[in-house]
Image (cartoon, rainbow, N blue to C red):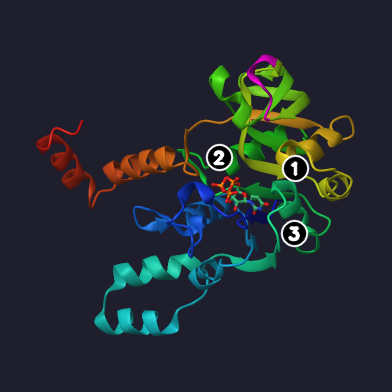
Amino acid sequence: MIRKAVFPAAGFGTRFLPATKASPKEMLPLVDMPLIQHGVEEAKAAGMRDMIIVTGRGKNAIEDHFDVSFELEAMLSKKGDSALLSSVRRVTDGADFFYVRQNLPLGLGHAVLRSMDLVGQEPFAVVLSDDVIDARVPVLKQMIRAYEKYSAGAVLAIQRVPKEAVSRYGILRGKRIANGVYDVEDMVEKPKPADAPSDLAIIGRYLLPPSIFPALMATKPGAGGEIQLTDAIRALIGTERVIGLEFQGVRYDAGTKLGFQMANIAFALKDPEIGPGLRAFLKKEKLT
Ligand code: UTP
C-alpha cells in the first residue's frame, strides 16, 4: 500500500514571471482547477490519503486552497448551489494535508528530503504537479500496478523525448523487460544529447522506498548546483529494483508557458461546459 504522496512546490516558478511573482506556479489554473489539485486528485484516485506539500515563501495560497472555507461553503449552501458546493468540498475531501517548508529551493532532491519525517519508514509517491498527465487510468495507478507486478523498490514514469530535448530531463539506461517496462541500470541528469544513454526521460511521477532519504543525505549538489533526486535514485540501483514505466496518457509540461497553454486548450476543449463554445470560437476566428 502506498498511502503518502509528496508534492514539491517550493520552486520560484521563474519561467512564469511576472505571473508567479506573488502567487505560486502550482496554483495556476487548468480550466478551473489549480495544477496542484490535478496532482492531488490523481493521487487520491490511486488510493493515496496523505498529501505532503513541500512549500516555501509566498506559497500560502496552496495551504488556503486545501483548507475548508467555512464562509464560502455556508454561502453556497444558502444559495442552494449544490454543483459549486460539491466542487469546493471535493478539494478537501478524501485526503489529509501536511506541510513542510523548504527554506531555499536547493533542488528537487532537497525538497523531497524535507518530507523525510512526515513520510517515515514507508514507500511513497512524488508528484510534480507541473507535469500534467491526461490518462484514462491515473498514471500513479499504472505505476502501482508495475510496482506490485515487478516487486520493485522504485518506479519512475518515463517517456521518449526528442534527442535535442534530453538535456532538460533525467535520462535512463535500462534493459527492456516487457512492453514499455525497463529495469533501470543507470541514469543521468540533464545530459548533453551526445552523452545521453537513451531517449527515455523521467517525468514527474515517482514511487520511492524510504531508503531514498539516506541516499539523498549523501547526495552532493549535481547538475545546476542543485541536489538532484535522480542522483539519489541512481545510488539505489543495485540495492533496490528500479523500474522505468512508459505510461499510457498524454503528458503536458505545464512548467513551461507553451506546455501550460497546450494543456489548457486540450482540457478546455474536452470540458462539457466550455468545450463547444471554445471550439466554435476557434473556428469562427480561423485560429486553428
Ligand atoms: P521546476 O524546476 O520545474 O520548478 O521544479 P521551478 O524551479 O519552480 O520553476 P522554474 O524553473 O523557476 O520556472 C519542479 C517542481 O519541483 C519543485 C517546484 O516547485 C516544482 O513544482 N521544486 C523545485 C522544489 O520544491 N524545490 C526546489 O528546490 C526545486
Q: Name the residue under label 2.
A: 139
Contact flag, marks 2 and 3 (Cβ < 8 Å): no
Q: Local crowd at mark 1 within 10 Å, few (<14), some, or many (≥20)?
A: few
Q: Nearer the viewer, residue 13 or 198?
A: 13
- Residue sitting at 13 percent across and 40 percent down? 280
**Furthest-top residue in view?**
194
* C-alpha distance separating marks 2 and 3: 22 Å
Q: What residue type is labelled 2?
A: Val
Read off the magenta span. Answer: 190-194
* Mark toward the start of the polypeptide (1 vs 2): 2
- Residue sitting at 63 percent across and 64 percent down? 56
Q: Is residue 116 positioned above or below 212 on the image?
A: below
Secondary structure found at label 1: helix
Q: Local crowd at mark 2 within 10 Å, few (<14), some, or many (≥20)?
A: many
Asked if the residue at label 3 sits under 8 Å from ligand 1, the reply is no
- Residue sitting at 30 percent across and 67 percent down? 83
Q: Name the residue under label 1.
A: 225
Q: Local crowd at mark 3 within 10 Å, few (<14), some, or many (≥20)?
A: many
| Residue 20 seen by the camera | yes
- 286 vs 31, left or right, is left
| Residue 240 seen by the camera | no
184 falls in the magenta region = no
- Residue sitting at 85 percent across and 36 percent down? 236
Foreground mark, 2 or 3, reads 3
* Mark toward the start of the polypeptide (2 vs 3): 3
Foreground mark, 1 or 2, reads 1
Secondary structure found at label 2: helix
Q: Which amino acid does label 1 sit on?
A: Gly
Residue 115 got which mark? 3
